[in-house]
Amino acid sequence: MIQIIRTTPDNPDFIQLIALLDKDIQERDGDEHVFFAQFNKTDNIKNAIIVYDNQIAVGCGAFKFYKEEVAEIKRMFVDPKTRGKGIASKILTELESWAREENYKSCILETGHKYPEAVALYKKNGFAITENYGQYENIEDSICFQKQL
């Protein structure tokens, strides 16, 4: 049974999933990991969700304030053992609903060319590629997305 909870980044299950995400990112990004890691801290995040499958934490996501009426989606992850069940789309849908409840009008996010499954996920869920924003401007490996809520 799939269950989604809203929480904060200090939730132990969220922390455990983020450790798995960071390991995956470090392997894929290689030498570029140090650059991207600085933007993936959870210090400024207050809105996090965890997805449980039969009471086991299998996925997570979060969002934070980017600028007025714009939330930035961060820390999306689904355990590779449970991929293919639509969990990532459920995470996105819940994050969008929560952001809408907090009066955000759009969401932005960043991924990279080394994450083709993430690019496909965001496109499938109505996100459109946009110009790279903020710290990702002029970063060739970054792909930025935006969606109106």
Image: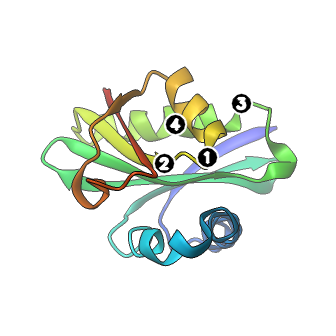
Which circle marks residue 115 in the picture? 1
- Label 1 is placed on what type of residue? Tyr
- Classify 15 as above or below 127: below
Residue indicated by mark 3: 86
State which tag comes first along the sequence, 4 or 1: 4
Residue indicated by mark 4: 92
Q: How would you rate the neighbour count of disc 3 (Cα within 10 Å): few for under 14, some for 14-19, many for 20 or more?
A: few
**What scheme was used to colour the molecule?**
rainbow
- Classify 133 as above or below 41: above
Which circle marks residue 63 in the picture? none
Tell me whether circle 2 and circle 1 mark residues in contact (CB < 8 Å): yes
State which tag comes first along the sequence, 2 or 4: 4
Residue indicated by mark 2: 111
Asked if one can make out residue 54 in the rendered structure from this viewpoint, the answer is no
**132 to the left or right of 127:** left
Of marks 3 and 2, the one in the foreground: 2
Q: How would you rate the neighbour count of disc 1 (Cα within 10 Å): few for under 14, some for 14-19, many for 20 or more?
A: some
Measured in 3D between alpha carbons, the distance from the residue under mark 4 to the one under mark 3, in whole angstroms, is 10 Å
- Label 2 is placed on what type of residue? Thr
Q: Residue at x 79, y 32 (%)?
A: 85
